[in-house]
Structure formats: structure tokens, C-alpha cells
Image: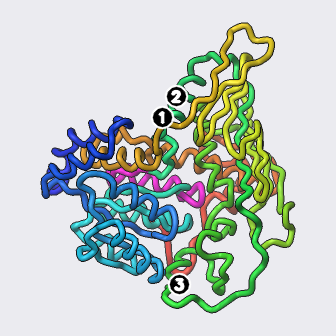
Amino acid sequence: MSTRRSFLQNSGTLLSGAVIAPAIHNKAFAYFKNKVMPSDQLNIAAIGLNGQGWSDLSAALKIPGVNVVGLCDVDQNVLDKRMKDLDGKKVDTSRIKQYPDYRKLLENKDIDAVIIGSPDHWHALQMIHACQAGKDVFVEKPVGNSIGECNAMIHAQERYGNIVQAGQWQRSQQHFADAIAYVHSGLLGNIRTVKVWCYLDWKQPNAVKPDAPVPAGVDYQKWLGPATLRPFNPNRFHFTFRWFWDYAGGLMTDWGVHLLDYALMGMKATAPKSIATLGGKFAMPNSAEETPDTLMALYEFENFNMIWDHAIGIGNGNYGKDHGIAFIGTNGTLVLNRNGWEVLEEKKNEHKVMVPFKPKVDNGLDRHLENFVSVIKSRKTADLRCSIQEAAHVAKVAQMGNIAYRSGQKLGWNREAGRFTDEAINKKYLMKEYHNGYQLPKI
């Protein structure tokens, strides 16, 4: 263990006790920040800053002793904007180095940990390279853009021993934990079906746009990385990249990994036996997107079924909520989402399990970054709220739904082998094909 890492670990006892308690006030953190020794400071850098990566970095900078020393993005416009944003947060930007290439950032020995907020098709490469460079990693969800990438990311963490947290911040919210504890209590009775849904009325399908010149300041070749070489198109760039198979998996892997995660956790479920889907581009058949705006996926498990249901462009989801998870039991149904949870009792139930709505009580993203920093200092990987192993599990389940949709088949899954029962499906979909000279490192 390096001298610097030893310092960080020695300081972990105080910080871990502070960050795990969700009720601790920001003023208390401010007090501790002034007491953190220089040798105990944690130097972080961020790769990909246009969207969630910036939110992650902002949350990390609220934590005592955390300093940003590096920013990386292939869009100089984004880098310029974030430097101004940091100025506005009273951050000393004179010590922050800017990098157009993340590999150069990883060479910096002063960086202890990196936040990866780049598009999905970059997550596996950047996380594995960061592990090889000795950095601890906070990687955005979905952690991998294919089942094969998820497996490679697990192997890298286990091979190099880094602290790797996935950005599924709902795992750090108290009301989610309380709801799952209620599910595990058995009070709902036998749970036969779990419904998971996401209806996004704020997102409308995009009209087709022509290819265009690459915007000034953007290194488009680096943005593409291992993805198929195509002309620049604004629909395939910032934010909306997630609706194209080259780079992501649509709503199923975007919101799906957050919500399916709690369905699987509540049922203590491993992998499904079979997966079947129905859906398509029904809202706007001629839209620019490749991923479906409407999709239903049925997952068959040993003793229950799980249903995924998504719709883009409308917001009237199940139980009057635009997103959520419903555990449908003999005695009642527990309905959970980012706003809170409740139990709706069956009319004939004699056990009186009704629970009135319990709202959220904390900031999940802030708590999630606090947990990450705490474990960096303690090196107790079991304390991570969302390890790469846990995140890869739900990401693979989400990928199964997409693969069933794209193949147009009902698929069987061999849990022991970690593969579909149809080898033609494995060959075509299990691992993402890499282009432009990129390849995943051999672990």
C-alpha cells in the first residue's frame, strides 16, 4: 500500500462514521473539513462532465477533504463551462489540470480516484484502465454496454483490488432501504409479480436531423472511441446518444438499471430463466431513435414474474406514478419510487398491512458519494452501497431485455454458464464489437 493510501486509510475512521449517518448536517461537515490534515486529502478527477458526471463531481466536492485536481472531456466547450462552474463554487481552479485524453489523466500519480461520467460505450474501457492505473473508481450506470463488458469490469476489479462504486445512488437513500426491509419482512404475503415501469413525459422522440460538421472544440474521434465510425449527427451526441445501440441501450438501461435493481433486491433474485419482450417505436415511428419508445419485457423467475414497462412521451404510469416498482403480494402491494413508498392493502386482507405514504428523507446522490469516499479511506469493500458486482448483475438483466427485443425471440438463460441457451444469440449480442483499433484489455 502506498504511503499516500496509508494516510487516507488512517483518516477513514473519522470520515466513515460521519458519512454513513444520513442525518449529519452540512455545517458539521464544514467543521470536519477544516480539521482534515493535508496528508488526508483525497484528490479526485472526473472523466466526462456534460451531464451526470458533473452532478457526481459536485456531490463529491461537498465532502470534507475532497479536492478536484483533474477534468477530462473530449469537448473543450464542456471543459470551459465546468471550470467556470467550479469558480462559482469557490473552488481553487489553479491546481486543476485539463485533459482531452483520459489516458493522460490516469498517468497523474497525484490522483487517487476518478469519476467516470462519459457515455455508456466508454464505461468499461475507462473503468478497467483506471483500475490498472491504481485508481479507485466511481463509474456511472449502466456500468457496461454489454453483458461481456460487465463481466470484464468485474474481473478487473477483482484482479486489481480497487474500490469501485457504481452510480446507482438510490441504493444510498433511506426510504428505499426502508421499503425493501418491509418487502423482506414477509408482511406482504406471497409476492407473485413485481411491476417496474418508467413513463417519461418530459422526453419526446427526436425528429430526424441531417449529418453535420463536428462542432468546434469537439474531438469526435475520441468521442466515438470503440463505437462504429459514423459521420457526426447531433442526435447521436450529448444526452441523446443513449437512444442509439452503438452507444447505449435506451430507457431500459438508462432508468431500467435504477428501478430493476430494487425489484431484484426486493426479491433476492439472481438471473431469470427466460425473457420475452414486445415493443417498438410507436409514439413516433419515423423518429431518429433506434431504441424503442415503448417496451414491455417479461422476466420469468423461479417463483415470480417481473414486468418491465416503459413509454417515452407520456407520463400516466401505474398507480398514478410516472415511475416505480410495485411488489404485488397476497396481503397488499408495496409501491416504491424516488419520492417515497406506501403499501396498498388487499380489500380482503385480515392482517392490516396498509402503510401510508412515506416520503423520501435524504439526498441519495450526496449520500452515495459520501459512502464511496468513506470506503476509499477504510478499504472495507463490503461497505460499498453498490459494488461493481451488484451493478453488473442488474445491468446484465437490463441487457437481457434489450437483446430479447432486438432478436425478436423469447430467450432462455443458462445461469450456471452465464450465457443464453441459444449460441447464435450469444455470438451476436453477448459482447459488444469494438472498432477503430480499440479493444478491452485481457484480464
Please name the residue that numbered disc 1 is placed on: 174
* Position of residue 31 measured from the top left corner of the image (x, y, whole percent): 21, 47
Given contact means CB atoms under 8 Å apart, are the residues at marks 2 and 1 in contact? yes
* Cα separation between marks 2 and 1: 6 Å
What residue sits 67% from the left and 18% below the top?
Answer: 354
What residue sits 63% from the left and 35% below the top?
Answer: 336
* Position of residue 75 measured from the top left corner of the image (x, y, whole percent): 48, 81
Given contact means CB atoms under 8 Å apart, are the residues at marks 3 and 2 in contact? no
* Position of residue 317 measured from the top left corner of the image (x, y, whole percent): 77, 44
Given contact means CB atoms under 8 Å apart, are the residues at marks 1 and 3 in contact? no
Please name the residue that numbered disc 3 is placed on: 221
Please name the residue that numbered disc 2 is placed on: 178
Q: Secondary structure at mark 2?
A: helix
Write the start and end of the magenta stretch as one range: 144-165
> Which residue of the protein is positioned furthest toward the top in this rendering?
350
The answer to which of marks 3 and 2 sits earlier in the sequence is 2
Give whichever of 135, 374 is nearer the camera.
374
> Mark 1: few, some, or many residues within 10 Å (few <14, many ≥20)?
some
211 falls in the magenta region = no
* Position of residue 367 measured from the top left corner of the image (x, y, whole percent): 41, 44
Examine the rendered structure and indicate whether residue 421 appears above or below residue 96: above
